[in-house]
Amino acid sequence: MDPKLKTVQELAYTAQEVPENYIQKDCDLGALNAPVMEIPVIDISFLGNSSTSADELHKLRSALGTFGCFQAINHGMTLEFLNQIRAITKQFFELPLEKKAAYSREAGGLEGYGSTIAFSEDQKLDWNDMLYLTIYPEDQRNLRFWPENPKKLRSILHEYTIKLKLASEVVFKAMAKSLNLEENCFVDQYGEEAKLRIKFNFYPKCPRPDLTLGIKPHADGTAITLLLQDETVEGLQFLMDNQWYRAPIIPEALLIFVGDQAEISSNGMFKSRVHRVVTNSERERISLAVLYLPEPEKDIEPFEKLVDESRPRLYRKVKNYVDFYLKYYLQGMRPLEAAKIDF
């Protein structure tokens, strides 16, 4: 890590004022008390059964087509285990800076510990620190960035990865069945070597939540994102019909939401929603986002069975969407719009 660059955690302890490069001048920050989004709760233990009912599949399809997300319960992990993950995340970010710095992101790299990557001098930065790791496939893990302190972090993260891989496959198969498609079509399109990457987020207290954002508005470039929220402190908001809504917390749930690539695959049947994270002047917050990223060389395009005269093909074929995403995101454009077919 560049010694001249302070982490947000350091700024929160030492800065009297929010630095200029963290002040979000062009964002609508008037919705700190936004209404709650009534996100459907879905028991995914039912989705994994061969006898999954039409009602349950309809509920999933409706949730992903309307809200772009759902609260997943009975996903194979106990509340005790999820709280262990939350506790270990907090323990890592509570370590002295010099201990965390041992896992710092290298110049030009993505993995490791640090703050927002600045791609330009005038970029507005997010009020958060993070630890970003590849967790699947196992042979692509770079253990140089996997903290050995707290001691149980590596073993618990390995177990969490296994559980999430199983849960994501259940969800993809149910998504397919809800659209009357062959159940493996999402998994097959995304490839056996699809990656799981995890982003441990830490949002320090901020003196000016009216001027800053924990994460600026964006939609994910993933297929799906599996989010473990802080057990008590809210912060995530979704944009629907030009209104920001707060994502409620269910401590035992995973919040699973559609990324751009699943919206493309579903020909717009499932919605990748723009979301953001607001800051808090009184309480710190953590979250863990697991990003399901298709193999970069796989063609991502609408399934043929979802294209007909009444619903034409909405998106062109894309490959290596993460690079495509970054190109348009840095231009201030929504990448998904660039993938749309003009009529």
Image (cartoon, helix red, strand yellow):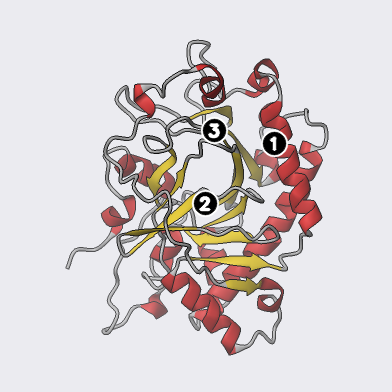
* Mark in front: 1 vs 2: 1
**Where is residue 273 shown, x and y percent of the image?**
40, 59
Q: Is residue 119 above or below residue 74?
A: above
Q: Secondary structure at mark 3?
A: loop
Q: Is residue 241 left or right of residue 190?
A: left
Q: Is residue 139 above or below residue 231?
A: above
Q: Is residue 190 above or below residue 20?
A: below
Amino acid carrying label 2: it is Glu
Amino acid carrying label 3: it is Lys
Q: From this viewpoint, is residue 298 visible?
A: yes
Q: From this viewpoint, is residue 320 visible?
A: no
Q: Residues within 10 Å of mark 3 (few under 14, many from 20)?
A: many
Amino acid carrying label 1: it is Lys
Label at residue 295: 2
> How many numbered marks does the figure carry?
3
Specify which label sits upstream in the sequence, 1 or 3.
1
- Mark 1 = which residue? 90
**Where is residue 198 shown, x and y percent of the image?**
61, 43
* Mark in front: 2 vs 3: 3
Q: CA distance from mark 1 to mark 2?
A: 31 Å
* Mark in front: 1 vs 3: 3
Q: Closest to the observer: 102 or 189?
A: 102
- Mark 3 = which residue? 205
**Where is residue 173 shown, x and y percent of the image?**
60, 73
Q: Closest to the observer: 98 or 231?
A: 231
